[in-house]
Amino acid sequence: MELFKEMIDKDYEQVVFAHDATSGLKAIIAIHDTTLGPALGGCRMWPYESEEAALRDALRLARGMTYKNAAAGLNIGGAKTVVIGDSKKDKSEALFRALGRYVESLNGRYIISEDVGTTTDDMNQIYMETNYVTGSTDAANSSGNPSPVTARGVYYAMKRTALEAFGDDSLAGKTISLQGAGNVATTLAKLAHEEGAKIVVTDINQAAAQNIVTTCDAKMVGVDEIYDVQADIFAPCALGAILDDNTIPRLKVKAICGSANNQLLDIDKHGKMVEDYGMVYAPDYIANAGGVINVADELKGYNEDRALKRVKTLYQLTGEVFDIAKKEHITTAKAADRLAEKRIDTFMRTRSNYLTKEKSVLKH
Ligand SMILES: NC(=O)c1ccc[n+]([C@@H]2O[C@H](COP(=O)([O-])OP(=O)(O)OC[C@H]3O[C@@H](n4cnc5c(N)ncnc54)[C@H](O)[C@@H]3O)[C@@H](O)[C@H]2O)c1
């Protein structure tokens, strides 16, 4: 990869390669954009097949965080860390403390948090070396596991999506086909079930799916069968890139709203295709922004009520995206990007005048 070409093309600010011989740390911190404030994004630990694959993932995910954070109205930018390694074998206190020291060296330009392959324990080790970490349970202002809050956000986005698709935001009597029965899906299923929705669930982990069958009176189907279920709303809460040429024509729903990141294999082609098949699509990074809204609240001194109140506004935000799509004759996926880009552009201009001291989300 020609790194500077990539950075110039998508306007990345900074890429840090971090190595520690003793712990075996090999990490990449990609900071995409800090126009709105310090960049916040999770730390993914994954046994990448090559260094280039790790770098590509870091860049892609960092940019995604810029869009998610901006669209959610947060005063934070976008970044991501990837640690090259197997989260089951390669973790150590030394590795995360070495990473924490690199985060500290960025002096608040970047705030790290959990992602796939990392846990609150890992964040606690990072916290020994830097305060620029969220989601650690040792810090005074910890917000804990974000998944239940992410699920709550998906639930509000889903209600607004139902209003768009059915003219009524109630989930009572609606059938939801749920792909995945993990952390987010479990809380989402519970909220929807409490409102009177029927759940059809699948997971490669049958025990996880069975748990939702038991707690929410759901029906279980096979992993591939989920796309053929006659339902009202499809909720992808497992993997990315699952909306493609093969799956979209099989869906028998009127709306799609779930927590998985990057659900559309190709944002332009498949964003259009879902609409051509008559489905309303809630853009993933709008629907799943509850988690980052929650951790970002830690920067102000975590207040659960305030964070949850903000998460509830994902209902209105989802509606705003639908309105932009209609007004500008673009897909809802593109409309979410427009919303994020407009916010960054507006504040780049509005905040361009000189101040001797600037107020920052990190200083209060
Ligand atoms: N946890 C959060 O706060 C959060 C925030 C934003 C986005 N997300 C995204 O939401 C999704 C779910 O997150 P989570 O925290 O619940 O993860 P999780 O790991 O707890 O759950 C994912 C579930 O998907 C299942 N799964 C994997 N492959 C599958 C397949 N082919 N078919 C069906 N099920 C399959 C897994 O067995 C697991 O039970 C992920 O894509 C994640 O990136 C999560």
Image: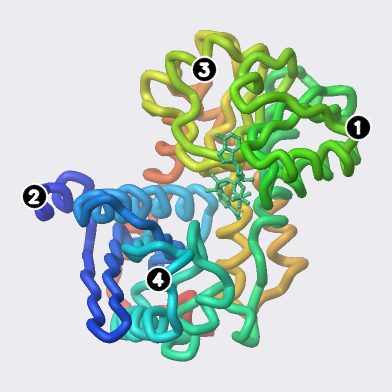
Contact, mark 1 vs mark 4 (Cβ under 8 Å): no
Indicate which disc residue 196 carries. Answer: 1
Sequence order check: which comes first, mark 1 or mark 4?
4
At x 66%, y 36%, the residue is 203
At x 53%, y 21%, the residue is 326
Mark 3 is surrounded, within 10 Å at the Cα level, by few (under 14), some (14 to 19) or many (20 or more) other residues, namely: some
Residue lying farthest to the front in this orientation:
89
* Disc number lying in front (4 or 3): 4
User: Which residue bears the numbered disc 3?
Assistant: 247
* Disc number lying in front (1 or 4): 4
Mark 1 is surrounded, within 10 Å at the Cα level, by few (under 14), some (14 to 19) or many (20 or more) other residues, namely: some
Q: Secondary structure at mark 4?
A: loop
Q: Amino acid at mark 4?
A: Asp
Relative depth, front residue between 243 and 306: 243
**Residue 232: percent from the left, percent from the top?**
74, 19
In the picture, the quarter occupied by the C terminus is bottom right
Relative depth, front residue between 105 and 13: 105
**Residue 32: percent from the left, percent from the top?**
30, 58
Q: Secondary structure at mark 1?
A: loop
Contact, mark 2 vs mark 1 (Cβ under 8 Å): no
Q: How many angstroms separate mark 1 from mark 4 (CA)?
A: 44 Å
* Disc number lying in front (3 or 1): 3
User: Which residue bears the numbered disc 4?
Assistant: 90
Q: Secondary structure at mark 3?
A: loop
Q: Amino acid at mark 2?
A: Glu
Q: How many angstroms separate mark 4 from mark 3 (CA)?
A: 36 Å
Compared across the picture, whether 355 is left or right of 17 comes to right
Mark 2 is surrounded, within 10 Å at the Cα level, by few (under 14), some (14 to 19) or many (20 or more) other residues, namely: few
* Disc number lying in front (2 or 3): 3
Q: Amino acid at mark 3?
A: Thr
Sequence order check: which comes first, mark 2 or mark 3?
2
Residue 227 lies in what quarter of the image? Answer: top right
